[in-house]
Amino acid sequence: MKKKFLLLLLIGLLFSSCEKILLPKEVENAPQQNFDLFWETLQHKYSYFELKNVDWQEVYDTLNPKITADMNSVELFDLMADALYLLKDGHTNLISGFDIGRNWNWYLDYPANFEWNTVERNYLGKTHRRTGPFYHQRIDSVGYIYYESFGQAFSESQLELVLNRFKDDKGIILDLRNNGGGSLNSALLLASKFNNSVPVAYYERAKQGPAPTDFSNWMPIALPNSSYYYNKPVVVLLNRACYSATNSFAAMVKTLPNIILMGDTTGGGGGLPVYSELPNGWTFRYSATQSRSRGGVDLEAGIGPDIYLQLDSIQLAQGKDSFIESAIMLIDN
Amino acid sequence: MIRKLCFITSLLWCTLSNAQQESELLLRFGMGYTRGFQYDEYLSDLVYKGNYAGVSLGVRHYSGNWFQQLQLGGFGGWMSLPNTNTSTLNDVGGSALYELQYQVNDSPIWGRSFIGVSNFTQGGVLINNRFGNNSLAYSLQTSIGIGIHAERDFQIKSQSFQLSIDQHLPLLLYGVLPDYVPSVVIDNTPYSNWSFVGPQSLWRTHLEWEWILSNQNRFGVEYLFQYGKIEGPNLKQWVQHQWFLTMSVAIL
């Protein structure tokens, strides 16, 4: 009996550490292993090497000799952040406890074209309403709505309540300047209220494997059906800081009959960002899909306006926002 | 399909229960600790380690030469990065095992052995709170295969004990995973696939030592080893070791 019991015990003990045989080997927490894992993950899953014209192997060959076993965390971080910088992608970051590696030149290299104090004090004023994330005010006979982030959720009824406020006005100005994105579902819902003519919001294809060409076919993203349609003119104000879901929203509504995009080209951000992490606990994110507009423009490059504007500094000094003034004039006429 | 399966199962259960042979029905409860390991390329190329609490509930039925059991389990806990021990992932899941077996051996030395079919299903959700669009890595796997059960009664100081081993050997498997990367366009439609053992695996080994009371109720300790693998768009592999205290109530 003892023998059988010992046999069972032995079987149990054998299983108790077999994860070391069955599972992949643990990645060591050392500079070289952290760098290699970071590079390989992007090599397999990053979606925009071709568009960015970046030879990722060349990046490895350049940076790898600089990796040493005794380099400190900041040195390693800076080296890996340098690699990400080359991708010029706002959805691609290295995140540690002490810094975030980034390339935000997609808006920092361009005029801001937005001055919140002027908007708040001279257009929204003290009497503006706030419905969910929407700041809204009537300016003469034009509705003005400011929405600062698609990360701030709203309900369909809140949105329709805001639009209904301006149903008897000449039109609305939808100010999305400095809206850095957030939920694509919110962008789709908002766009659906201005559309009764096209079924497709934009197209997307997903990375489906580690090879550079492993992509799905381009597939349409449908604009949700909406029983509510705002049929007056809508001017959407944009600047370079419009990114990600806001950039996608611009692509969704561009070319719709009542919509005019006004301002600067949006910042881009056409890939869906996903995350991974390294043995040292740092996380990093990167674009993992590609998207393009109904007209075939890659969303990563940004969406150009129908009417290009730069904020007039002389008007700004007088307390006027030339984007809003131009939009009012356009709707009035 | 599910209705048919339920009907056939209940028919078998009733038939076996009504058999005019020696019959025993045990209602089983268990709870304890689970040590888990997960590798999921959907999240990263790291092997996460975790500690869980788990419970189980089941019935075990002997009728003549037939043996069948249904075992349901649930677990929940935290996983951490391998080197930092920072608990950043939550893992919850459950499993179901059904076995129907026929006695093929009854010897005074080796005890009773049964062999038959078994179905083992395991599903879980691994949540990495530090991630965004790919924070949720789920999996569901079911397998049909060969079930083997062996048990041996023995006495120590006039008390009755039983040692048993229970093995599920998968043959045909069905696995569900997220796609290679999350996407809006395909609305994160999961990858799913049938395969024979190889690209997928769902192994289950169960060892138990029970103390049988005079009223046939039982207290026991069990060790359960489970291993799963799906070679989908991203490779997923996991290992669990469970150490449970069990109680079985004889209701027949």
Image: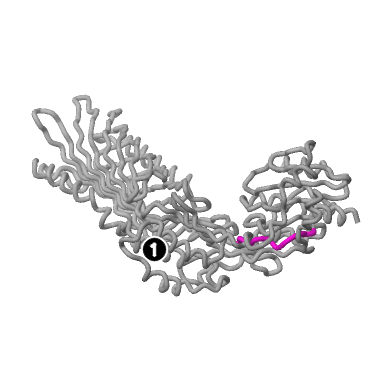
Q: Does residue A328 appear to the left or right of A31 in the view shown?
A: right
Left or right of A291: which side holds B133? left
Please tell me whether residue A86 is drawn above or below residue B15 in the rendered image: below
Q: Locate residue B28: give its quadrant.
A: top left
Q: Quadrant of residue A137?
A: top right
Q: Residue at x 36, y 62 (%)?
A: B199
Q: Residue at x 20, y 34 (%)?
A: B210
- In the displayed structure, B169 sits above or below A167; it is below
Q: Amino acid at mark 1?
A: Phe
Q: Is residue A85 above or below residue B138?
A: below
Total count of labels: 1
Please give left or right for residue A289 compared with residue B232 in the image.
Answer: right
* Residue under numbered circle 1: A35
Please state the chain letter of the residue tagged with numbered disc 1 in the rendered image: A
Find residue B37 and report its horizontal and vertical position in percent: 33, 49
Q: Quadrant of the C terminus of chain A?
A: bottom right
In reply to whether residue B145 is colored magenta, the answer given is: no
Residue positioned 33% across, 56% down in the render: A29
Query: Label 1 crowding class (10 Å Cα cut-off): few <14, some 14-19, many 20+?
Result: some
